[in-house]
Image (tube, grey):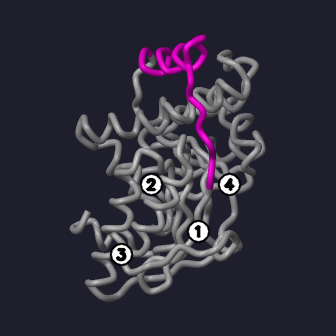
Amino acid sequence: MSGHSKWSTIKRKKGANDAAMAKVFTKIGREIAVAVKEGGPDPASNSKLKNVIAKAKAANIPNDNIDRAIKKAAGEGSTANYEENIYEGYGPSGIAVMVETLTDNKNRTAGNVRHYFDKCGGNMGQNGCVSFMFSRYGVLAVEKEDVDEEALMDAALEAGAVDFLSDDESVYEIRTEANDIGAVREALEAAGYTFALAEVQYIPSTYTKLEDEDSLKAMAKMLDLFEDDDDVQNVWHNWENEEDAEQYM
C-alpha cells in the first residue's frame, strides 16, 4: 500500500464525530435503497445488498440502523429513486479524480460537482478523461492485531483474491476482482476474519505528488466539499501524499 491505500481516509472517518457518522450512514442508506430496489430486501438472495451490508458493518453502523434502512427501502411507501453517475476531472496540478454519486436530481448533482472542481482550481472533464488510469478492485482490510499474516494470506488467495498487501502499519489489504468481493469476503468470514473495510474501489495505476502548500490546501478543500455533499458516495484520486494535507482537513 505504501501510503496509496484509502485506509488513511477510512481511519479518519471511523474516528469522526456523530454528525460525520450520520452523513456516512446517509450515503450508505442510499446504497441500501438502490440495492433493495434492484434485488429485493433479502440479502441471502441479493448479493449487492449483502455487499452493502458488509460495507455498513465495516463502517461501524449499528445493525438496527441497517435493518431500518432495508425495511424503509422495501416499504410500499418508499419513493427512493436514485441514479448512479460517475464524474471525472482534474484537481490541482492535474490530480486525477473520479466522483461516484447517487442522486435523485442529476442536474443538481452535476452542477455541484462542477462547482467543487472549479472552486478548488480543478476542472470537470468528459467521461473517460481519467478513468483509464484506474482499475476496479474489491478491497478488504483486516486489522493486523492478533492476526497471523501467512494464514490470512493463504486463506485469501485460496478464496480467490488477486493480491495481498501488508505495507500499511495498521491493516492487511486484500484485493479481489470487483465481482468477486462477496465470495472472497464470505469465505474469510467463515474462517473467522472480520473487516475494517469492505468495498469496491477504483485503484489508480500511477500517482501524483503535490509539493506546494496552495495545491495541498486546494486539494484538501476539494475533497472536503465532495465528502460533505450527500449526493457524493465516493471520491477516488491518484493523490500520492494525501496524508501531508490532513492539517488542512
Q: Earlier in the sequence, mark 1 or mark 2?
A: 2
Mark 3 residue type: Cys
Label 1 crowding class (10 Å Cα cut-off): few <14, some 14-19, many 20+?
Answer: many
CB under 8 Å between callouts 2 and 4?
Answer: no
What is the distance, in whole Å, between disc 3 and disc 1 at their CAs?
15 Å
Mark 2 residue type: Trp
Q: Compared to 184, does 113 lie above or below?
A: below
Q: Earlier in the sequence, mark 3 or mark 1?
A: 1
Residue at mark 3: 120
What is the distance, in whole Å, between disc 2 and disc 3 at their CAs?
24 Å
Q: Position of residue 236 (x, y in %)?
A: 53, 62
Residue at mark 1: 88
Q: Quadrant of residue 100?
A: bottom right
Label 3 crowding class (10 Å Cα cut-off): few <14, some 14-19, many 20+?
Answer: some
Q: Secondary structure at mark 4?
A: strand
Q: Position of residue 62 (x, y in %)?
A: 40, 22
CB under 8 Å between callouts 2 and 3?
Answer: no
Find residue 137 and name its label.
4
Number of the front mark, 2 or 3:
3
Q: Secondary structure at mark 3?
A: loop
The residue under the point 54% across, 13% down is 71
The residue under the point 48% across, 51% down is 232
Give the position of the C terminus as an image quadrant. bottom left
Q: Quadrant of residue 159?
A: top right
Magenta-drawn segment: 64-85
CB under 8 Å between callouts 4 and 3?
Answer: no
Number of the front mark, 1 or 4:
1
Q: Compared to 228, does 42 lie above or below?
A: above
Residue at mark 2: 7
The residue under the point 69% across, 41% down is 181
Mark 1 residue type: Glu
